[in-house]
Image (spheres, rainbow, N blue to C red):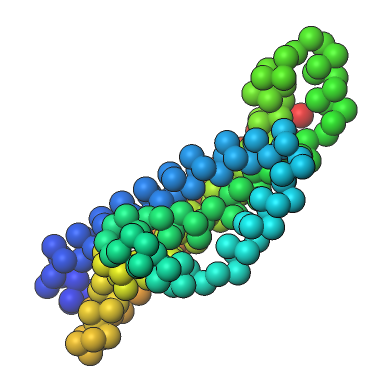
Amino acid sequence: MLDWISANPRIFWTAVENHLWLSGVALLAVMLIALPLGLALTRHRSLANSAIAIVNILRTVPSLALLVIMLPVLGTGFLPSVVALTLYGLPALLLNTYTGLTEVDRDIVEAARGQGLSDVQVMTRIEIPLALPVIFAGIRTAAVQVVSAATLAAFIGGGGLGELITAGMANFNFPQLIAGAVAVALLALLVEIGFASVERVMTRSARMGA
């Protein structure tokens, strides 16, 4: 594996860069959709059950199936891969955002309103800070899911480390295959460790603030 990487550094690092770019854009899209949507659902509880039911359906669809579904809609390449990965990572963050906000102690919220805070102030000063550890746990889960599933984007021309794996399988180039597989595993592990560390700090801060 290391011999193959040292012999093909440009191919390897280009694949890593593409994988990170693909995963990063998809995770950003997940956050831009899930965070405001989760907040909106807490203000419109009548819609929450339907939205959560749809999200739970998404959770049952395999990541490769989502990628394949994008083919007749958006074709191949970067965009359909990002859309599929966004749909794959969306449920974890949306559910955590909604859960975290709805589980904030209502007594604390009512006390804040009793002190004259507006709805926006209650949301920004009370609800979101207290829900942040749960929300960030959703971001961590979504990030790991996206980084892992991005491997399959190679099947629809999305690039990334999956190309090393598929090319290695096709050409019986096992060092190349192993290089891609190990790199994906290490990336997912680093993302998990990094986000988990930040989550612990945020949880500790939230408890101290409480």
Q: Nearer the viewer, residue 25 or 76?
A: 76
State the image coordinates of residue 32 (x, y, percent, origin top left): 48, 40
Q: Residue at x 69, y 57 (%)?
A: 53
7 left or right, relative to 155: left
State the image coordinates of residue 38 (x, y, percent, origin top left): 63, 41
Q: Extreme front residue here? A: 72
110 left or right, relative to 191: right
129 versus 56 height, above or below: above
Q: Nearer the viewer, residue 50 or 172?
A: 50
Q: Residue at x 64, y 57 (%)?
A: 54
State the image coordinates of residue 70 (x, y, percent, origin top left): 39, 64
Q: Extreme bottom residue here? A: 172
Q: Quadrant of residue 34?
A: top right
Q: Is residue 196 visible?
A: no
Q: Extreme right residue here? A: 107
Q: Is residue 78 visible?
A: yes
Q: Quadrant of the N terminus?
A: bottom left
21 versus 124 height, above or below: below
Q: Residue at x 75, y 13 (%)?
A: 117
Q: Quadrant of residue 73?
A: bottom left
Q: Extreme top residue here? A: 116
Q: Nearer the viewer, residue 13 or 124?
A: 124
187 versus 35 height, above or below: below
State the image coordinates of residue 6 (x, y, percent, origin top left): 15, 70
Q: Residue at x 85, y 19 (%)?
A: 111
Q: Quadrant of the C terminus?
A: top right
19 left or right, relative to 96: left
